[in-house]
Image (spheres, helix red, strand yellow):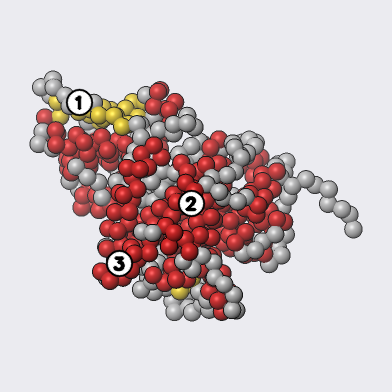
Amino acid sequence: MKTDTRETDRLLEEIADYVLDKEITSEEAMTTAANVLIDTLGCGILALRYPECAKMLGPVIPGTIVPNGVKVPGTSYVLDPIRGAYNIGTMIRWLDYNDTWLAAEWGHPSDNLGGILATADYISRTNMAEGKDPLTVKDVLVAMVKAHEIQGVLALENSFNRVGLDHVLLVKVATTAVTAGMLGGSREEIVNAVSHAWIDNSALRTYRHAPNTGSRKSWAAGDATSRGVFLAMTALKGEMGYKTALSAQGWGFQDVLFNKQEVKLARELDAYVMENILFKVSFPAEFHAQTAAECAVALHESVCNRIDEIDRIEITTHESAIRIIDKKGPLYNPADRDHCLQYITAIGLLKGDIVADDYEDEAANDFRVDQLRDLMVVTESEQYTKDYLDPNKRSIANAVQVFFKDGTSTDKIDVEYPLGHRFRREEAVPAIQQKFADNVASHYSKKQGQEILAVTSDYKKLEQLSVPTFTDLFSL
């Protein structure tokens, strides 16, 4: 038998080594992960109010019973870990209200919680059935830190959107890696699993852009994280991997789909991404528009009674916002509206707040929304773009100023860092906790809601909880 002398792609090895060997020592990353956990689940719970989300959930075949199955928060479903990951991931992403990472490639690293929590629950319930110890919430938090890091560091300098691929590719890669580790995979098995994630390719970004913007963007991450669990479980059954899945000449990911560019890590994997993650605290809107929303809400009192007197509205922003969410013309559905800088700004000016219902047809049919959109002029600030890309700042700046027909104007309101930014973390944490409490109250009885809040409000108590005890808290 010939010896295989091919060298494995270094990126596959770096990811596997990180998953297996890296000890997370950052207390900031762990406490931030705890806030990400409750915030992310809260977003999913709120999404259950929306029939278009609820219809996507449950088993593939109604009535399916799964031994030691995964409990889907806010529901009575008990599913296999792959379908459980899809359900949890879809809930999380539906309202575009969970955390965000902005770099050359943007995305939402907490989407990986779908696969992580489902896998942790399945492992734990299987262990308990065999007389073994379950995993704890601390194990979930460590996996979250690592998934955030893999997805986020890959995103720093690799722009998949520029070649038309969707950022959920990185959810698949990160979920595959960390769940393979959680399942007890060896270094070789994790490498094999991650190689399959790259070979799988990625969804196209078609459903995120006009003229095809649609609701698939709300379940694409659920699909990706569930696929990650499937690939991890497949590799642990002994399925072979592909050493040069990225670099193979002519047939690897880089040559076929990435314009022959090398996919690489911009920095050593540690806990940087979780420490710097962006929370969507105030508004369920695409993150490049968060500071524009803050500006618009601040201007509400000055303009709400003078809508017919407005001559123009100037929005100053950064390049990524122009590329992603600068939209003119008709907006066809909620998925279109929550990714439109002008729509979000208009709602903030008109109402002094922005909530998920503002993207539904009833709100969109207010003629004043399009009236204001037609008056908006969007321009790039080179300084905003520079600060957006600066690794020591990572600002997401926008400014809004309203000009009236009589020659007067409002102040120019500019916000560099949204409430969910690391620079405003102390200010944000109480608001994150209140957001979670409000989301819990939207779905659970007062008694069950109080039980959930009593546990989740204490980080030390939370991390020691067994995963099944934690997921039981959220079940109906």
Label 2: state its secondary structure.
helix
Q: Is residue 189 left or right of residue 54?
A: right
Query: Which residue carries the number 1 mark?
Result: 411
Looking at the image, is mark 3 or mark 1 earlier in the sequence? 1
The answer to whether residue 253 is visible is: yes
Image location of residue 419, percent across then percent down: 33, 41
Q: Is residue 251 left or right of residue 323?
A: right
Query: Which residue carries the number 3 mark?
Result: 449
User: Local crowd at mark 2 within 10 Å, few (<14), some, or many (≥20)?
Assistant: many
The answer to which of 214 and 289 lies nearer the viewer is 289
Between the C-alphas of marks 3 and 1, the distance is: 42 Å
Q: Is residue 399 above or below residue 108?
A: above
The answer to whether residue 327 is visible is: no
The residue depicted at 47 percent of the width and 71 percent of the height is 468
Label 3: state its secondary structure.
helix
Q: Nearer the viewer, mark 2 or mark 1?
A: 2
For residue 201, the mark is: none
Query: Which residue carries the number 2 mark?
Result: 30
User: Local crowd at mark 1 within 10 Å, few (<14), some, or many (≥20)?
Assistant: few
